[in-house]
Image: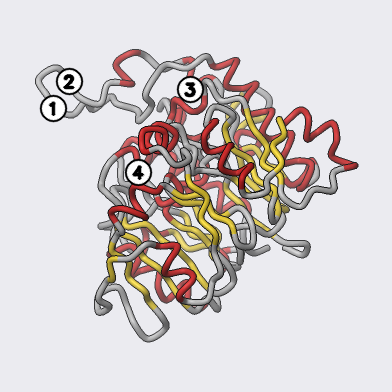
Amino acid sequence: MSVRSEIEKISEVIVCEPGKDHDLMRPEHIQEYLSEGTLNPDYLLFDDLIDTQLAIKEHREFTDLIKLFTGPGGCYDVWNYFTDGSEINPGVHEHNPGLFDKVMPNLIFTRDLAVRIGSIIVGTWAAKKVRNHENKLFAHLLYELFEPEEVIHFHDIAPNTSLEGGDVTIFNKDLVIIGISERTTKEAIKVLEPIIFDEGFNRIYAVELPKKRSMMHIDTVFTRIDEEDVLYFPPLFDLQKPNIYNITPGKSISNVKPTQINLIELLNEDGYKTNGIKCGGKLGLNQYREQWTDGANAFCLQPGIAVGYSRNIHTIEELKKNGYKIMTSNEFISKFDNISDDKIFITLNSTEICRGRGGPRCLTLPLSRGAHG
């Protein structure tokens, strides 16, 4: 199994269906700050209490799509590993005592908990302590699923910093793009450099992001959906033009000077032909509104076929202008055997899961892409 491209056909992926953890959330769990302005230790990174049953329906709509490409056996749910019927497997309790007494609503965002870089899978370590319970749980999962030589536990080799999977984009077999964000540090990228280059990649872009919740990871502002097409957030890349470290073998983020440049411009300069599709369309207000509701966060099922939230209507209009046929998930499923369009954007209903600040890409952890993994 390996991942050497963001867009090759998905063949194996880990997801996590919403459930009891969301029913256990209380109002104090969605308040980041206490009344006196201090951080709330009970804050669980969700922005609202969600309708769990509707969230489950939305998630199953998504996984039904994924299974068209992976087959039923290639889309794994986390809870299938950790439960036996309604009970937690004894082996999980043995390795992770007390973890299941924690409320973990963010476990649905499996993307952040590990990242497949070529043939290696790196178990991550979250910046927010509330998610470190999930990291420990996933360490057990990786122990169960993979051979020891396939797995690197990031916290073991870099105990004083953080890395989250939403900040790592395996752009293609040559290039990896990583966000320097509120969740992933420069130090983390320095640790990843030899892993990435040893896997045969030849370049890393490390992109400075604003340290804010709305842009917590690179995939909140930039995702690849076809050979040449990316969704992106224009205010960051067209106007602000972030600092980008262009790292090649023999160099490091610690000794490369960044360049303030539009990421799409840099991609084209370095020979990665790229067409940017604006999240939110041309109007700045809509760009900010739809970036907040994950308009730039799409999940690619195979080249040219991607999934995003139906609520981001201005982003969808931009996709139409760039040659994409828009289909609802139900329409796509019903016509799957007869679909011949090269470029399709599939829309998901999204009133509930979106409140956790995560899009379709966030809901997936690809283990393998491509016909042969």
Question: Considering only order in the chain, which callout, 3 or 2, is on the residue closer to the N terminus?
Answer: 3
Asked whether residue 89 is in view, the answer is no
Q: To which residue does mark 1 refer?
A: 38
Residue 323 is situated, as x and y percent measured from the top left of the image, at 67, 48
Q: Nearer the viewer, residue 253 or 224?
A: 224
Residue 101 is situated, as x and y percent measured from the top left of the image, at 42, 25
Q: Please name which of the two marks, 1 or 4, marks the residue nearer to the observer.
A: 4
Q: Please name which of the two marks, 4 or 2, marks the residue nearer to the observer.
A: 4
The amino acid at mark 4 is Met
Q: To which residue does mark 2 refer?
A: 34
User: Mark 1 and mark 2 in contact (Cβ < 8 Å)?
Assistant: yes
Image point 58% across, 67% down: which residue? 172
Image point 49% across, 38% down: which residue? 295
Asked whether residue 167 is in view, the answer is yes
Q: Nearer the viewer, residue 314 or 300?
A: 314
SS label for mark 4: helix
